[in-house]
Image (spheres, rainbow, N blue to C red):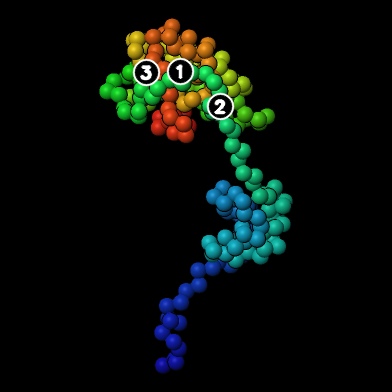
Amino acid sequence: MIDLPRSTYYYRSTAKASNLGDSELVAIIEDIQDELPCYGYRRVTHELHRRGHLVNHKRVARVMRANGLSIKPRKRYVRTTDSNHDSPIYPNLYRNVIPSRPDMVWVADFTYIRIAVGFCYLAVILDACSRKVVGYGLSKRLDTPLALAALHSAIENRKPSPGCIHHTDRGCQYASETYRRALDAAGLQGSMSAVGNPLLVSARN
């Protein structure tokens, strides 16, 4: 009988020999960078080893350099809410209670969309009961006319009964006199969330 420790019988190497072609290696590195965008070639090499691919760090560096797989920059955050203004603030009439039927509560918000030359902005209004988009507007400017475009779209599409609650954050676009006049004309009740409280039904969900 061979005199070997018991653990020898159960040992299996999980590392795979470096027989990956460059195209296969590129695909794996892209997957790693999708999950870990701040990883350079040294950390990518370590992650490859952890996943069982024994690849030399010099090869990883060469493949990444040849295929433009440098460290991905962090996505830039675009602020869409400016609540630093002197316009009137509506009380919170919504309080995140899901209504029993459509067109009782609308929730409005802004978000942004990354495009090749920067960003464009989307103003959207959701029905808090059905969570369906009832109106929207798209523009390169984050301003009151964009918010109004979404509001007019929603009113035209749904023709809500007077008293429908229109809930937003405290952004200056929604607090502007022009927007408040448009709400009054449509018979909508303005409502705003408290400072620092995100909307539970948001255009970014």
* Sequence-first disc among 2 and 1: 2
Q: Quadrant of residue 7?
A: bottom left
46 horizontally vs 99: left or right:
right
In the rendered image, which residue does mark 2 sit on?
A: 84
Residue beneath disc 3: 165
What amino acid type is highlighted by mark number 3?
Answer: Ile
Q: Earlier in the sequence, mark 3 or mark 2?
A: 2
Q: Residue furthest left?
A: 100
Quarter of the picture containing the C terminus is top left
Q: Please tell me which residue lies in front, 180 or 67.
A: 180
Residue for point 40% across, 30% down: 201
Q: Amino acid at mark 2?
A: Asn
Q: Is residue 189 left or right of residue 175?
A: left
The CA distance from mark 3 to mark 1 is 15 Å
Alpha carbon distance from label 2 to label 1: 26 Å
> What is the x, y in percent for residue 100?
27, 23
Q: Can residue 130 be seen here?
A: no
Determine contact: label 2, label 1, CB under 8 Å: no
